Amino acid sequence: MKKFLFLLVAFSSFLFGADGESVKSFSIIAAGIGLGIAALGGAIGMGNTAAATISGIARNPALGGKLTTTMFIALAMIEAQVIYALVIALIALYANPFIG
């Protein structure tokens, strides 16, 4: 509960510290939260991919090369999704269409 209140106060300070420009403050908060969630999801997906690949190689070592290649392709696709979230966050911060 204390952590939640601390985060609420921290986010409120972003909102009130922008000299009345609440759109910019909401953009900063949205970019931070969105990128954090994207990075968390990407890390979980990469961990699951690596664990499944290691398990598959342990069960059938002859397929190690094919499984490793497939794993690297899957990791690149997962990382691409995180990079897309980064691009959207940068657009929200620097080229926000809602700021006049």
Image (tube, rainbow, N blue to C red):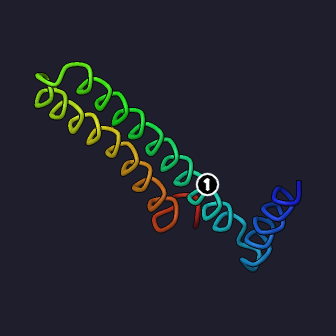
- Residue 64: image quadrant is top left
Location of residue 18 in the rendering, given as x and y in whole percent from the top left corner:
72, 77
* 61 or 67: nearer the viewer: 61
Q: Residue type at mark 1?
A: Ile
Direction from residue 9 to residue 39 in the image, left or right: left
Residue, x 32% and y 26% (percent of image)? Answer: 55
Residue, x 24% and y 34% (percent of image)? Answer: 71
Direction from residue 73 to residue 52 in the image, left or right: right
Residue lying furthest top: 60
* 58 or 100: nearer the viewer: 58
Dot 1 falls on a residue whose secondary structure is helix
> Is residue 10 depicted above or below 67 in this figure?
below
> Is residue 4 depicted above or below 42 in this figure?
below
* 8 or 58: nearer the viewer: 58
* 92 or 67: nearer the viewer: 67
Quarter containing the C terminus: bottom right
> Is residue 54 depicted above or below 91 in this figure?
above
> Is residue 5 depicted above or below 16 in this figure?
above
Location of residue 84 in the rendering, given as x and y in whole percent from the top left corner:
38, 48
- Residue 53: image quadrant is top left
Task: Estimate how packed mark 1 is, as few (under 14), some (14 to 19) or many (20 or more) residues with alpha carbons within 10 Å.
Answer: few
Count of picture labels: 1
Q: Which residue is mark 1?
A: 33
Residue, x 48% and y 40% (percent of image)? Answer: 44
- Residue 17: image quadrant is bottom right
